[in-house]
Amino acid sequence: MYYLWVFLIGGFICTLGQVLIIYTNITSARILVTFVIIGVLLEAFGIFDPISAFAKAGINVPIIGFGASLAKGAISAVESKGLLGAFTGGLEATAGGIAAAIFFAFIFSLIFKSKTKS
Amino acid sequence: MYTNQTVIFKNKPVIIGSYSIVGPKEWKGNFGPYFNYVMKDDCFGEKSYEKAEMKMLKTAIVGAIEDAKIKASDVNLLLSGDLLNQIISSSYAARDFDFAFLGLFGACSTMAESMAVAASIIDGKEFDTIVCSTGSHFSTAERQFRFPLELGNQRPPTSQWTVTGAGACVISSKGVGPRITMATFGKVIDFGVNDVNDMGAAMAPAAMDTMLAHFRDTKTTPDDYDLIVTGDLGKLGSEILIDLMEDQGIKLGLNYNDCGQMYYTRNQNTFSGGSGCGCSATVLNSFIMKKLRSGEYKKVLFMPTGALMSTTATQQGETIPGVCHAIVLECDESVKNIKISQTSNRNVKNKKEEKTNRTSISKSNEKNIKSNRLN
Amino acid sequence: MDKSMDIKKRNEMYNNYVQAKIPKTKAWPSLFYSFLVGGIICCIGQGINDLILLWFPNMAEQSAWAYTLIVLIFIASFLTGIGVYDKIGKFAGGGSIVPITGFSNSITSPALEYKHEGIIYGICVKMFTIAGPVIVSGVVASFIVGLIYLFI
């Protein structure tokens, strides 16, 4: 049953992105940046976890989740390591995703070639 | 208050040969049957799209020289340009030829720019035979001006599709063929448009300015031409141009059209139409040249527009300036008196031939279609 | 001075005119598709997460999410490589940009595009032309948040 929530909330967040594309004409890089910052802010104000409890992948899969784990990592690392945590925490928490994206991009760019559109 | 921008050629340089080469998507478009050569795929047997663009230009130049039935050693000068940084396609294509090279950059207006310069040099009797060429490639332009090909983004409704194609023509002081009688060099005009996805709107004011200058300098009206054709304003841009000209008191009638707007069929998902150097170059060197040779068009005003933008400038907040150069092409004396009824008969016959051509290409895509010259 | 004011006014008028002239497309279909595709991608993510927890019941929730994202990134990267992701994107717009798969696509697509410039100057240098700002802004924002938490 919670898949319905996942679908609705995930779909809603993506539609917000599409609204931004249509009405402000911004490029995909700016959309990603906007949503990452939204994620960081949601986590900083403690709103992310209550939503995540019932939306699950609906909010973790959109790039908002990436922003939230950056903030979450920074906050928890600050608690254990102090100032150093503010530097290391964010990337530590998201290192898996970033490394995966870099690694797969590297491998696939060696194998495949970009094709023209038609 | 006004300075003269138009050159009227006394010796009327002749276009003795022309050649066009396009990609598969362009072949499926409205001008499909008129092109000389269709590439099997966008790579053209090369490793990268940039290399394919160089090869395309080279093929077009060789084809035009062959079509003119002259030797390569007769050519004095090559005038060429394209959209890439440092116009690499043109200069790299030129290194394989044994004649002088002059690189031009007029963005999508390069075809008219090169022809106007060539005609001026020939009219001054300095050189005898000059080759003009230009081309563009969708994939190279997309990478340079927009995003990587595989990025999953949507194209806005005002965006245009860069034509994959190259055109070349040989201009000479003597011979038979369409003649260049006048050329109007355009000013750089900027009306403050900064949307990179809306090139038509950025270039329309430049087209208006050059058109006004042309009509003023030559004392002609739109009715004096069988066809007035702009380069790649697209659907939106050509509508804007019609409005702008109306504001200036000149009505563009049915004889006005735009290459970009006509280029693709409606279901090819190109939104506002075709763009790029290749757009006007391939249409001029196939469709328009054929009609001029047969005498169906007597007098054509060809005025491609170019958006002189770079990603660096637009990212720094600059607006997009446009430029437009116009040339007047007239058919040869020998076909000037052909009556329209006769040509329309010929037209039907041509269409049948085109149909057979079309099927023959579908059998082997990479087949050279010789344009059937009537004289 | 007078003339520059004139040009400014002319440009403003022209831009307003162009804005009015731009064909208005219907927004609803694209909004619907982005909702649909975005929802489906999130559901796939949830499915992967559930499967991981089913097979490895002892895994911490945090690590399960990390694995989920890695799998999604792998799928998106592969689809980009075989030239399918841009077709989904053309159809779905925001639906395929906003999920983490869009992030993966924006790293893989420039890597593919600049392959011909070589491994170092092509793939490695250009990989972050689109996704770079995401990491930079995310890291800067998370650092600021961490700093604020340090002082309160």
Image (cartoon, coloured by chain):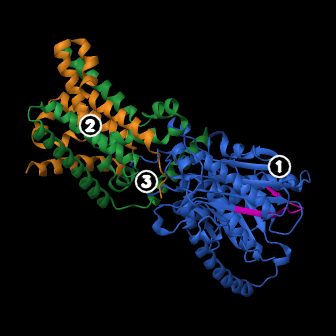
Chain colours: A orange, B blue, C green
Residue B187 location (% of width, % of height): 69, 49
Q: Which residues are magenta?
A: B4-19
Mark 2 nearby-residue class (10 Å; few <14, some 14–19, many ≥20): many
Q: Residue at x 8, y 35 (%)?
A: C57
Q: Which residue is mark 1?
A: B77
Quarter where residue C1 is shown: top right
Please report contact status of discs 2 and 3: CB closer than 8 Å, yes or no.
no
Q: Earlier in the sequence, mark 1 or mark 3?
A: 1
Give the residue type at disc 1. Leu
Give the Cα separation between the discs numbered 1 and 3.
Answer: 40 Å
Q: On the picture, is B359 further left or further right than B12?
A: left
Residue that numbered label 3 is attached to = B155
Q: Nearer the viewer, residue B158 or C86?
A: C86
Q: Residue at x 26, y 40 (%)?
A: C71
- Looking at the image, residue B131 lies above or below residue B330: above
Q: Nearer the viewer, residue C17 or B307?
A: B307
Report the residue marked by disc 2: C70
Horizontal side, residue A72 vs residue B329: left or right: left
In the depicted structure, whether residue C46 falls above or below residue B128? above
| Quadrant holding the C terminus of chain B | bottom right
Q: Position of residue A88 (x, y in %)?
A: 27, 18
Residue B125 lies in quadrant: bottom right
Comparing A104 with C143, the one in front is A104
The subunit letter for the residue under badge 1 reads B
Give the CA separation, mark 2 to mark 1: 58 Å
Mark 2 → mark 3, Cα distance in angstroms: 29 Å
> In the structure shown, which secondary structural element does the residue marked by tag 1 occupy?
strand
Residue at point 63%, 62% (across, down)? B248
- Residue sitting farthest toward the right: B125
